[in-house]
Amino acid sequence: MSLEEYKKKRKFNKTPEPKGEIKKKKKNLFVVQKHNASNLHYDFRIELNGVLKSWAVPKGPSLNPSQRRLAVETEDHPIDYAEFEGVIPEDEYGGGYVIVWDLGTFKNITKKDDKEISLNQAYDDGHITILLNGTRLKGEFALIKTKREDQWLLIKKGDSEANRDINIIEEYQDSVLSNKTIDDLKKAKKGNLDKFL
Ligand code: MN
């Protein structure tokens, strides 16, 4: 685990994103950030070994177990990133708008041959099962690595929190922290963002 790639990609005198560091204190955080960059996507991140393992999910998470969402693994992010929302300047890496769409904690419940295994092993195996306790995402989710480099699938497991009738990303457009939407940020960009957030 390392934040070298994260740091290499960003100019911290240009972007408001946190520089961050590896944090030893374990909180088992997960976060989903709605990121309107060149393409709108949702960044799904879970804490592991002092960083946030990160996947970009183009279609966003689903509560419907039959909808397997492509999740492309990206560089590890600092734990402090979990509460980041704001405007990344257009010409910078990931330029666009970020809001915290969901934030909470998770529990690793991955099993192999009926035995519980560590999150590190689950990640290395490319088969992670976690129990999410967020504001919007709850219950069991799986992250399964495919044969294609960096490509995983994010899948809701069939439990009492599964729901085939609701489109969760349409249902909730705003931030769980500030209640701002991406559109609010776009408007604020023209004014004083510091005051606005
Ligand atoms: Mn992103």
Image (tube, rainbow, N blue to C red):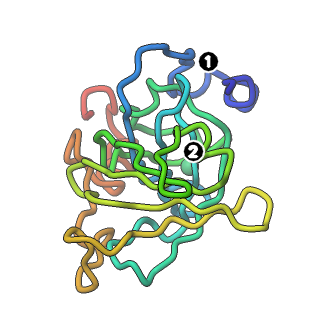
Q: What residue is drawn where x is 56% and y is 15%?
A: 21
Residue count near mark 2 (Cα–Cα under 10 Å), binned few <14, some 14–19, many ≥20: many
Residue 142 numbered mark, or none: none
- Name the quarter where the C terminus is drawn: top left
Q: How far across and how far down the image is residue 31, in percent?
A: 39, 43
Q: Which mark is residue 13?
A: 1
User: Does label 2 or label 1 sit earlier along the sequence?
Assistant: 1
Give the residue at the far front of this rendering.
Answer: 114
Residue in view at x 25 percent, y 48 percent:
134
Q: Is residue 84 left or right of residue 126?
A: left
Q: Is mark 2 within 8 Å of ligand 1?
A: yes
Number of marks:
2
Q: Label 2, on which residue?
A: 54
Q: Is residue 157 above or below residue 119?
A: below
* Residue 121 lies in quadrant: top right
The amino acid on which the numbered mark 1 sits, given as a three-letter code, is: Asn
Q: Type of residue at label 2?
A: Ser
* Category of crowding for the residue at label 1, using alpha-carbon neighbours closer than 10 angstroms: few (below 14), some (14–19), many (at least 20): few
Query: Where does residue 185 sit, x and y in percent of width and height?
Result: 35, 47
Residue 109 located left or right of residue 23 = left
Callout 1: helix, strand or loop?
Answer: loop
The percent position of residue 44, horizontal first and vertical second, equals 48, 51
- CB of residue at label 1: within 8 Å of ligand 1? no
Q: Secondary structure at mark 2?
A: strand
From this view, report whether residue 172 is shown above or below residue 51. Answer: below
Q: Quadrant of residue 104?
A: top left
